[in-house]
């Protein structure tokens, strides 16, 4: 606050606040791909870190001398680390950290190669301001004061911080009504209330959701059940029961997006086997992944339950003790033997607990495979060896069986031994995208060998084979390289279309056909049960039979975006599919509330563990 003797002096606390404020805004602009539509949104983005920094660092104004120095320096480093952690996470996932994500500590050992790819010594720049604050704490100059504020000044300071926080929230609500109650996109939250306040809001949500289960009752399920009944579509009459009595083999392709199907890199086919396999199969070319922070585990959750994953963390960790009406349980009730096959630690993504809850007869994990240095790369066992050894497990299973495979080689950071590269890397500014094509090609070759072995063992003709991508492989942080490969700008519309993943369903005796119905992973459970001849009319699920003539051509993504036959809605903008340009919002408005309702209903089921009341509310 200065004195008469030294009118130009400035508070050490204020210096720290301003430095962290400007750094945070700079990170917003250069490290986070936050879409700004007008000057008001830019202004909100600029001011939103300030109130938090005033509240937290402002505590230093109640201290003096050494105590103030220690508090401000320590708080500056902690705050900088929180921001930096979000930067690192955003580099790969284009998303922000949540509290449930931090509970997934059992995954950390397997993440070493991925994290190593995302950080570097140059990142010390993210702590430059904190280091400067540390240096200023030791500078002896009358221009910087370390005094305790007088009561009147301290009160004015905190009233200003409170006023700024409400001003920020008021502007944000004017730009985005129902910001804190009906927003499923974290980017919108960060854009409006800031990274730091987002973490506070996330902590509030964590407390709220913890209480939801204790307060839940069966009456909440009735409204949801009525909604899903109204949305139910009759299964395909032609294909209902087409898989009855046959084995069901489902293969989840790690990080495989649909843009590689039928395409080339350096003049070479990326997926030659799948391109051929599609000709004798049903191929869905408008099929979207709907995962969130749980990635592969979210895709498994969607397959099993036809419920949306949570927007925060992974259901496999946060709600593994809930009661679910899983695909595996339903198939077991109809005489199927159920198994999961994944040559990884059984505890990764809490799979051992969740698979047991889903009712699987057997989980073939790391101890069930001969894994060594020669047949491993990146995250673990190579796909070729995984499939080769897995066929032996299939041969010992009771028939009919439902077997779900999870591949591993095409996983970020997309490492591959030279002898396993069937095509050359791409040439762009993104090493991630460059390496992606050879690992996709490797998985394609592994699938070819797997199908050949199924034929040799007499399993092919008696099995329905489903192959689908689990989630995106190339995040929005590689848009420049993707733009180079695709030959066009990556707009929000194009980015949403890139969330399509392959879905191939091979049914013995059926001719191949491409189906362009807009669909998503939430439709897998009802589709597979329909093929198995199992009725799901009484089930609570948000998907429908992909072969049904009544499919509604409507799919909701976890962030609230949605796609219809003619429209794409994302990041608050409505796009016309034909022109790929923004169109009148009125075209999308009829679907916006439906999308929010579906996500909200699904969240209520998970947070309240409502399926434990399924059937019981009718008896009471």
Image (cartoon, rainbow, N blue to C red):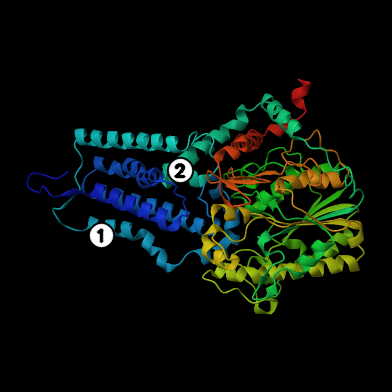
Tell me residue 140's x, y (percent): 16, 57
At x 55%, y 40%, the residue is 585
Q: Is residue 277 left or right of residue 113?
A: right
Circles 2, 1 touching at the beta carbon (< 8 Å) = no
Residue 412 in view in this figure: yes
Which is more toward the observer, 553 or 104?
553
Is label 2 in a helix, a strand or a loop? helix
Q: Is residue 169 left or right of residue 578?
A: left
Tell me residue 69's x, y (percent): 26, 51
At x 79%, y 44%, the residue is 545
Tell me residue 327's x, y (percent): 78, 44
The residue lying furthest to the top in this view is 620
Task: Report the residue marked by disc 1.
Answer: 135
Quadrant of image for the C terminus: top right
Mark 2, Cα crowd under 10 Å, few <14 / some 14-19 / many 20+, is many
**Separation of residues labelled 2 and 1 (CA atoms):** 30 Å
Is label 1 in a helix, a strand or a loop? helix
Task: Identify whether 117 is placed above or below 359.
Answer: below
Of the numbered discs 2 and 1, the one sitting upstream in the chain is: 1
Mark 1, Cα crowd under 10 Å, few <14 / some 14-19 / many 20+, is few
- How many badges with numbers are in the image? 2
Q: Is residue 519 left or right of residue 52?
A: right
Tell me residue 454's x, y (percent): 87, 65
At x 49%, y 44%, the residue is 188
Task: Report the residue marked by disc 2.
Answer: 198
Task: Identify whether 414 is placed above or below 25.
Answer: below
Numbered circle sitting on residue 123? none
User: Residue 260 falls in which quadrant of the image?
Assistant: bottom right
């Amino acid at each position: 606050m200065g004195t008469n003797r030294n009118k130009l002096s400035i508070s050490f606390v204020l210096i720290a606040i301003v430095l962290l404020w400007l750094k945070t805004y700079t990170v917003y602009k250069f490290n986070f791909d936050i879409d700004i539509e007008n000057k008001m949104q830019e202004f909100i983005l600029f001011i939103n870190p300030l109130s938090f920094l005033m509240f937290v660092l402002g505590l230093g104004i109640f201290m003096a001398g050494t105590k103030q120095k220690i508090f401000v320096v320590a708080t500056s480093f902690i705050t900088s680390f929180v921001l930096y952690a979000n930067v690192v996470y955003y580099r790969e996932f284009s998303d922000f950290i949540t509290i449930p994500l931090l509970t997934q500590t059992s995954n950390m050992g397997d993440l070493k190669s991925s994290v190593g790819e995302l950080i570097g010594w140059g990142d010390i720049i993210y702590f430059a301001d904190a280091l400067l604050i540390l240096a200023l704490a030791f500078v002896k100059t009358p221009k910087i004061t370390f005094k305790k504020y007088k009561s009147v000044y301290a009160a004015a300071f905190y009233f200003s911080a409170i006023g700024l926080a409400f001003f920020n929230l008021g502007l944000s609500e004017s730009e985005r009504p129902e910001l804190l109650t009906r927003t499923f996109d974290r980017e919108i939250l960060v854009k409006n209330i800031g990274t730091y306040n987002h973490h506070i809001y996330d902590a509030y949500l964590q407390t709220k959701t913890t209480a939801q289960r204790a307060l839940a009752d069966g009456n909440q399920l009735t409204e949801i059940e009525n909604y899903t009944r109204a949305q139910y579509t009759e299964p395909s009459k032609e294909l209902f029961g087409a898989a009855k009595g046959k084995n069901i083999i489902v293969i989840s392709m790690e990080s495989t997006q649909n843009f590689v199907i039928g395409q080339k890199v350096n003049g070479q086919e990326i997926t030659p086997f799948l391109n051929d396999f599609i000709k004798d199969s049903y191929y869905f070319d408008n099929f979207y992944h709907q995962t969130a922070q749980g990635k592969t585990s979210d895709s498994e959750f969607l397959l099993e339950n036809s419920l949306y994953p949570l927007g925060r963390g992974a259901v496999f960790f946060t709600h593994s003790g809930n009661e679910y009406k899983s695909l595996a349980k339903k198939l077991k009730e109809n005489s199927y033997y159920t198994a999961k096959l994944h040559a990884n630690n059984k505890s990764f993504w809490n799979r051992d607990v969740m698979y047991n809850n889903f009712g699987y007869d057997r989980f073939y994990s790391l101890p069930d495979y001969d894994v060594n240095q020669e047949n491993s790369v990146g995250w673990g066992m190579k796909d070729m060896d995984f499939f080769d050894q897995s066929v032996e497990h299939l041969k010992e299973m009771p028939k009919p069986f439902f077997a779900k495979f999870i591949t591993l080689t095409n996983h970020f950071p997309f490492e591959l031994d030279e002898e396993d590269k069937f095509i050359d890397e791409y040439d762009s500014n993104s090493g991630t995208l460059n390496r992606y094509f050879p690992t996709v090609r490797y998985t394609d070759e592994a699938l070819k060998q797997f199908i050949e072995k199924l034929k040799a063992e007499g399993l092919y003709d008696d099995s329905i084979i489903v192959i689908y991508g689990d989630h995106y492989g190339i995040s929005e942080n590689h848009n420049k390289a993707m733009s180079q490969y695709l030959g066009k700008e990556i707009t929000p519309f194009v980015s949403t279309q890139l969330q399509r993943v392959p879905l191939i369903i091979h049914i013995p005796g059926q001719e191949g056909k491409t189906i362009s119905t807009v669909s998503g992973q939430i439709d897998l459970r009802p589709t597979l049960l329909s093929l198995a001849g199992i009725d799901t009319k009484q089930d609570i699920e948000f998907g429908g039979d992909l072969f049904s003539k009544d499919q509604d051509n409507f799919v909701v993504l976890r962030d609230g975006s949605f796609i219809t036959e003619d429209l794409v809605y994302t990041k608050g903008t409505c796009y016309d599919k034909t022109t790929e340009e923004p169109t009148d919002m009125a075209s999308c408005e009829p679907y916006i509330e439906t999308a929010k309702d579906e996500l909200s209903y699904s969240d209520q089921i998970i947070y309240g563990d409502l399926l434990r009341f399924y059937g019981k509310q009718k008896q009471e």
